[in-house]
Image (tube, rainbow, N blue to C red):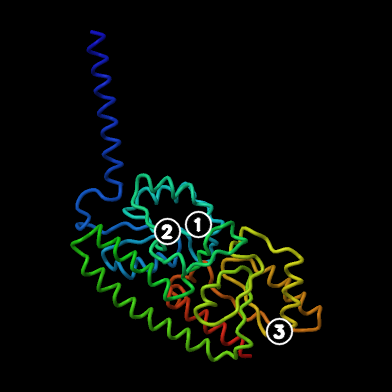
Amino acid sequence: MKKVVLKVALLISMLGSLVALTACDQAGTNNGDISTRQIKIVATTSMIADAAKVVGGERVSVEALMGPGVDPHLYKASAGDVSRLEGADVIFYNGLHLEAAMGNVLEQMAERSRTVAVTDTIDRSLLFTPPQFQGNYDPHVWFDVSMWMKAVDVVRDTLAQMDPKSADLYKTNADNYLEELAGLHEYVKTHAQTVPEARRVIITAHDAFNYFGRAYGFEVRGLQGVSTATEAGAADVQAMAEYIVEKQIPAIFVESSVPKRNIEALQAAVKSRGFEVAIGGQLFSDALGDLGKPEGTYIGMVRYNIDTIVSALNK
């Protein structure tokens, strides 16, 4: 009798495990015919989420973990975020150590979910390796529109692989979007050239704009280096103030995802030297603006940034 009871208990336990595994399978990434429903996408940043929405169209539902004003360098996944990631068919993230504080979570997700870094196909020889960033690449590739087009390719190819029945749709959407991005790239280049060469200097809280500077002809300087995890010291502020006075730079910029206190301290340090430098406006660096506003899309954000930079530096 005891043997029978033990066998029944063992069978119940095995069935329970099977049910749990089946539930996990249903919430997993690549099971069943995905063409019969929307693909659930979770993106870490708003820039990636925007690309996924454009390429995926009505075939996808997209959620961004990091909204407007959020700093991805310091962002830590909450329990709710982990639940969202586990329920996704595919997770798109930037990579290149941008989501540094989420590294362990993304590694764990990669073991059981389709997890894709949108920067994987970018030629590493094109990437900056700032010495102060501990041997990692500069992750802010979206500021060179031509490089961000590679990320769009990754989104298109991933969705087409997951959902071959809609591959033509993803290709058409991506082709149209890439054409818009090519036009955006030319728009930024043309507007940058309206600033006298001696004034093409962008000073912000952290070095997010290096790819922008290389692509569009600006010198870029940041108080905090590539990652906001490092703090600017008093010596950094004083040295930058001397540089601004020497070069007679008319404007410096705050960033939407970085506290403005360091830039305000820099402005005060410049003023103490008898020179007035304006805060030329807020730039979007590590996140898009609010949804529903032009800067809430990647194209709108890039246009907003270059228009703000040109207006401030030409005064």
Q: Position of residue 121 (x, y in %)?
A: 38, 64
Mark 2 or 1, nearer chain start: 2
Evaluate if marks 3 and 1 touch, with contact meaning CB atoms under 8 Å apart.
no
The amino acid type found where label 2 is placed reads Tyr
The residue where tag 2 is placed is 93
Q: Distance from label 3 to label 1 (Cα)? A: 35 Å
Q: Distance from label 3 to label 2 (Cα)? A: 39 Å
Q: Distance from label 2 to label 1 (Cα)? A: 8 Å
Crowding near the residue tagged with mark 2, few <14, some 14–19, many ≥20 C-alpha atoms within 10 Å: many
**Residue occupying the point 42% across, 63% down:** 119
Mark 3 or 1, nearer chain start: 1
The amino acid type found where label 3 is placed reads Lys
The residue nearer to you, when weighing 30 against 138, is 138
**Residue occupying the point 48% across, 70% down:** 288
- Describe the element under mark 2 as helix, strand or loop: strand
Q: Position of residue 100 (x, y in %)?
A: 53, 54
Q: Is residue 144 above or below residue 118?
A: below
Q: Is 68 left, or right, of 28 in this rendering?
A: right
Quadrant placement of the N terminus: top left
> Of tags 3 and 1, which is closer to the observer?
3
Q: Is 309 left, or right, of 110 in this rendering?
A: right
The residue where tag 1 is placed is 99
The residue where tag 3 is placed is 247
Mark 3 or 2, nearer chain start: 2
Q: Position of residue 315 (x, y in %)?
A: 63, 90
The amino acid type found where label 1 is placed reads Glu
> Of tags 3 and 2, which is closer to the observer?
3
Evaluate if marks 2 and 1 touch, with contact meaning CB atoms under 8 Å apart.
yes
Q: Residue furthest top?
A: 1
Crowding near the residue tagged with mark 3, few <14, some 14–19, many ≥20 C-alpha atoms within 10 Å: few
Crowding near the residue tagged with mark 1, few <14, some 14–19, many ≥20 C-alpha atoms within 10 Å: many
